[in-house]
Image (cartoon, grey):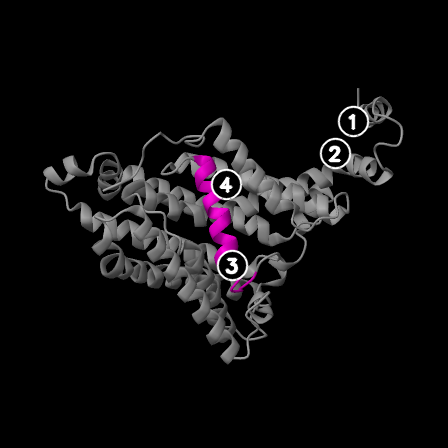
């Protein structure tokens, strides 16, 4: 039975006018190759960015047992800093290669800068409250996030930049080949998909491979994984676990900022103070669904959330459901289902993290 026959049969089974013509047309449109390709590729692109941001959060919790509520704020800072560097460093005549190459340099610079800031934050603010209850850590990091958000709002407004919804000048630095539908995908599937999503998929895969290699193939990665399981034993072996805490916290902040730089070019996001809470909520959903402290779980959960986001965004854009908050509601529904069915997450364990 082909797809069209299946849909016709489904429509006949359901009661007469229960399904509106718009809904049935939407079902038919969904099974078209170009629609499936668009949802799948855009979903993977979103998943890549969610993974970049969320993996920093899960690394910090996996080793340190700290839920960093300033994580979204550092992604916002990364988006704004990336925008500033791109706007200042590029001219209107800069070509595609120049823009992409400069973007890679900006990512490296911001990663290094924010990793150092994160390490300093761990030493100066987080370390003194390790022996206190988790509420102190939550309030501290949440307060840092609010301070960064208000500073961004003040600075952006003072410089004549609209703090919300997005900073258009930063988004405009995207090269034409990434900001317009990809010719390759248009020829293959007839789908009009921005080249940015292919770029995000490739970049996300590279960063995922780098983080995986760091955790599994390096001596320091071994220290981090061992410290997340039994920090007392690792310290007894002469390894400075506190130093590992500093490095991981810094790396987590740096990865959040890198995700923010990618969101600078995302057509649905862009530099904005609203990124603070938006990114924080999505990152926590990914981490909780995947399992706190699990690299594999974060990767799988990011793909699930990215696909759900892409599909529900298409449903809203198609007009099948006229509710702009549909993607957010769907993603939180996934979170609720995950907490009911498997509270520790897809690949999590009952207890993880701590020091």
Give the CA distance from mark 3 to mark 4: 17 Å
Which label's residue is closer to the chain start, 1 or 4? 1
Name the residue tied to disc 3: 275
**Left or right: residue 294 compared with residue 321:** left
Tell me if residue 222 is in the magenta stretch.
Answer: no
Which label's residue is closer to the chain start, 1 or 2? 1
- Which residue does the image show at 31% across and 47% down from the upper left? 134
Give the CA distance from mark 1 to mark 2: 7 Å
Q: Give the position of the N terminus as an image quadrant.
A: top right
Q: Mark 1 and 2 residues: CB-CB less than 8 Å, in contact?
A: yes
Q: How crowded is mark 3: few (under 14 residues within 10 Å), some or many (20 or more)?
A: many
Residue ranking furthest to the top: 1
Name the residue tied to disc 1: 3
Name the residue tied to disc 2: 31
User: How far from the left and from the top, in percent, is residue 188?
Assistant: 69, 42
Give the CA distance from mark 2 to mark 3: 33 Å
Which label's residue is closer to the chain start, 4 or 2? 2
Q: Which of marks 2 and 3 is in front?
A: 3
């Amino acid at each position: 039975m082909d797809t069209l026959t299946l849909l016709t049969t489904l429509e006949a089974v359901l009661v007469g006018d229960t399904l509106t013509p718009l809904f049935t047309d939407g079902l038919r449109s969904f099974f078209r190759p170009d629609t499936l390709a668009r949802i799948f590729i855009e979903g993977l692109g979103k998943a890549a960015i969610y993974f970049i941001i969320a993996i920093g959060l899960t690394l910090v919790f996996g080793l340190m047992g700290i839920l960093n509520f300033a994580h979204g704020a550092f992604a916002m800072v990364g988006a704004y800093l990336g925008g500033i560097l791109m706007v200042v460093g590029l001219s209107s005549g800069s070509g595609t290669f120049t823009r992409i190459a400069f973007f890679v340099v900006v990512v490296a610079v911001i990663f290094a800068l924010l990793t150092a800031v994160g390490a300093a934050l761990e030493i100066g603010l987080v370390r003194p409250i390790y022996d206190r209850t988790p509420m102190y850590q939550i309030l501290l990091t949440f307060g840092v996030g609010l301070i960064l958000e208000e500073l961004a709002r003040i600075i952006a407004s003072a410089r004549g930049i609209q703090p919300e919804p997005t900073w258009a000048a930063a988004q405009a630095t995207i090269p034409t080949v990434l900001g317009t539908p990809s010719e390759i995908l248009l020829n293959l599937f007839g789908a009009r998909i921005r080249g940015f999503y292919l770029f995000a998929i490739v970049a996300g895969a590279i960063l995922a491979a780098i983080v995986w290699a760091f955790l599994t193939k390096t001596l320091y990665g071994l220290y981090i994984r061992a410290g997340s399981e039994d920090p007392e034993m690792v310290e007894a072996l002469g390894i400075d676990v506190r130093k590992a805490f500093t490095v991981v916290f810094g790396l987590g902040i740096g990865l959040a900022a890198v995700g923010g730089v990618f969101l600078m070019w995302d057509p649905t996001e862009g530099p904005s103070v609203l990124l603070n809470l938006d990114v924080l909520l999505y990152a926590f959903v990914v981490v909780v669904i995947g399992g706190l402290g699990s690299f594999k779980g974060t990767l799988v959960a990011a793909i699930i959330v990215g696909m759900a986001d892409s599909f529900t965004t298409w449903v809203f854009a198609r007009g099948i459901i006229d509710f702009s908050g549909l993607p957010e509601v769907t993603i939180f529904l996934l979170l609720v289902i995950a907490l009911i069915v498997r509270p520790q997450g897809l690949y999590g364990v009952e207890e993880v993290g701590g020091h």
